[in-house]
Image (spheres, rainbow, N blue to C red):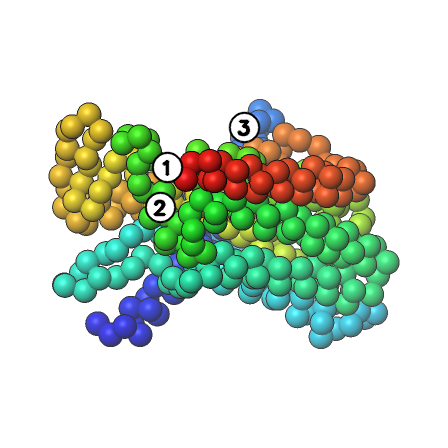
Amino acid sequence: MSDILILLIKIVAALVWFLVLTLYLTWLERKESAIMQDRIGANRADFFGIRVIGLFQPFADAIKMMFKEDFTPTFSRRFIHNLAPFVAFFFTAVTVQAIPFGDVLRVGGKEIKLQVLDIDVGILFILAMLSFTVYGVLLSGWASNSRWTLLGGLRGTAQLVSYEVALGLSLIGLVMVFPSLRFSSIVNYQGELLFGWLPQWGILLQPLGFIVFLFASLAESERVPFDLPEGESEIVGFFTEYSGLKWGLYMFTSFMKVLLIACLLTTLFFGGYHVPWLNPDGFHFPWGGEWLLPHGIVVLFQIIMFNVKVIFFCWLQILIRWTYPRFRYDQLMDFGWKFLVPLSVINIVATAIVMTLLK
């Protein structure tokens, strides 16, 4: 099997995983919110009479969205108005290519890395792609040629730019501890043990950085309590003038960001695909026991563990979204600039002091 074919297979597999899991996040949110509100949730869509707790609902919603009327206002700047949702969607979708899903899969004497792009500046690549999504928000607000969408676009741009500062600063301490911008290297560092038994996950070495990153990334997803750009309960929102599939792309992109945040939290702070005490040849427990496993089973354990962690953080974000009310705009900006940014600077200074003392 040629290297180009392997690369194409990995690209397609990563995108399919990302898009399908994002699609099912819509089902998870509806079910989780229903449970919190003592409702049943989505359960009507069926396939040949089989419902399976509403698992076919995301596909029914997608089909319905494709055939809904796509209305473009006559007063809008038509070309940019149509382009904006695809800009937001594209720059969010490509980020999954830098996420490692597992270590190495050996097939027929060939080693295949379970990661599409293992680039030296993986963290910068993700941050750059997230920065480009701002254009999808700004362009939609401006191109719709409406005062309400423009207000939502300006809100969104100010929010995303502000919280990207804290997002980037929160990762500096992590890079100081794990001296690399490459995702695979950061995950491998977390596979080592502290005191001979404790996995040195990023959450243990950078707890303050994790807290800042979590809140800043929640603001990047533009969901409650940081949903000022969308304003779901108001008439102010950057996609107010959108309908049909283009509106669906914006909603889908929002859920893609939820999944991306879960992937980053897993990869940077919770060991990625690592299972505690699982080595390439099986489990080696700190109390002396071992459980040797075939290579394929080890890889399967890693992929399952990665997905379990990711789904947990998706569940957590949805829980936060249905638990807390929205910030006022001044509270939103104060929280970013007066709390998260200083906290991230304190984390950098504290990390530098601790590392100096431990030398």
In the rendered structure, which amino acid carries the disc numbered 2? Answer: Tyr
> How crowded is the residue under tag 3: few (<14 C-alpha within 10 Å), some, or many (20+)?
few
> Of label 1 and label 3, which has the lower sequence position?
3
> At numbered mark 1, what does the secondary structure look like: helix, strand or loop?
loop
Q: Position of residue 69 (x, y in %)?
A: 67, 62
> How crowded is the residue under tag 2: few (<14 C-alpha within 10 Å), some, or many (20+)?
some
Q: Position of residue 5 (x, y in %)?
A: 29, 72
Tag 1 and tag 2, C-beta contact below 8 Å:
yes
Q: Position of residue 110 (x, y in %)?
A: 18, 64
Q: Is residue 57 visible?
A: no
226 horizontally vs 62: left or right: right
The residue labelled by disc 2 is 189
Relative to 126, say whether 339 is above or below. above
The residue labelled by disc 3 is 35
> Distance from label 2 to label 3 (Cα)?
39 Å
Residue depicted at 60% across the width and 33% down the height: 320
Residue depicted at 76% across the width and 43% down the height: 333
215 horizontally vs 357: left or right: right
Residue depicted at 79% across the width and 42% down the height: 329
Q: Is residue 159 visible?
A: yes
Residue depicted at 62% across the width and 42% down the height: 345
The residue labelled by disc 1 is 200
Q: Nearer the viewer, mark 2 or mark 3?
A: 2
Relative to 36, say whether 13 is above or below. below
Q: Residue furthest right?
A: 147
Tag 1 and tag 3, C-beta contact below 8 Å:
no
